[in-house]
Amino acid sequence: MSSQALCRNVFLIGPMGSGKTAVGKQLARLLDLTFYDSDVEIERRTGVDIPYIFEKEGETGFRERERDVIDSLTQLQDVVIATGGGAVLLPENRERLAARGRVVYLRTGIRQQLERTKHGRQRPLLYTADPETRLRELMEVRAPLYESIASVVVATDGRHVRIVADDILERLQGQAQT
């Protein structure tokens, strides 16, 4: 039996607007696990919001903070963690996520991302005149990284949080039986 079969950790990855936080909260309730959002944890530890970190430290500084938070959160047991969309950019994050739990990629199209992020102000990478082009650029780099560590891939476009969480639960249970 693999160490992942013994581990009940579930890590949600995917682009901004894919529903990682909402689905993660629901999934944690269904599995009776503790939920963490890595972005919220970064803000809690620093005492400032993510746009402020980007402004003062740039994306590089933010990614260093994100790396440290992901390292500590993934060492916990019986957790569901929603990661930031760019968490997969650092190799050490991908390695830790893949080794310490089951990784679920919430696949989401650009149109759905645009719809879900259009009113948010907490997304510094979308502070641009053309968010759609920016989202396409991000997905070009990130989609292969999401795919490379995912043990489960679930589409979220046009689907309710509960349905997505139920789908993930069913797939994870199916994997545990094989």
Image (tube, rainbow, N blue to C red):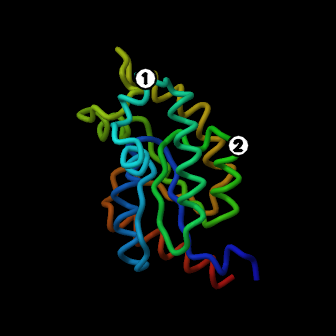
**Horizontal relation, residue 138 to residue 46: left or right:** right
Q: Which mark is residue 56?
A: 1
The amino acid on which the numbered mark 1 sits, given as a three-letter code, is Lys
The one of 173 and 94 positioned closer to us in this rendering: 94
Residue at x 43%, y 78% (from the top left corner)? 31
Looking at the image, is 143 positioned above or below residue 59? below
Picture disc at residue 143: none
- Element type where label 1 sits in the image: helix
Q: Nearer the viewer, residue 175 or 63?
A: 63
Q: Is residue 144 left or right of residue 54?
A: right
User: Toward the viewer: 177 or 41?
Assistant: 41
Question: Is 114 above or below relative to 29?
Answer: above
In the displayed structure, 3 sits above or below 157; it is: below
- The image quadrant that residue 36 belongs to is bottom left
Which image quadrant: the N terminus?
bottom right
Q: Residue furthest right?
A: 1
How far across and how far down the image is residue 168, in percent?
48, 68
Q: Which residue: 56% across, 76% down?
A: 8
| Residue 49 coordinates in the image, percent (x, y) | 33, 37
Residue 128: image location, x then y, percent:
37, 17
Residue behind mark 2: 91
Q: Quadrant of residue 149?
A: bottom right
Circle 1: is it few (<14), some (14-19), or many (20+) Cα within 10 Å? few
Label 2–label 1 contact, CB within 8 A: no
Question: Compared with residue 133, is residue 90 higher up or lower down, i.e. above or below?
Answer: below
Residue drawn at (45%, 51%), measured in percent from left and top? 38
Q: Residues within 10 Å of mark 2 (few under 14, many from 20)?
A: few
Could you tell whether 13 is left or right of 156 in the image? right
Work out which quarter of the rendered image holds the C terminus and state it.
Answer: bottom right
Instruction: Look at the numbered disc 2 and give the secondary structure of its residue.
Output: helix
Q: What separation in Å lies between label 2 and label 1 (alpha carbons)?
A: 24 Å
Looking at marks 2 and 1 on the same chain, the residue that comes earlier in the sequence is marked by 1
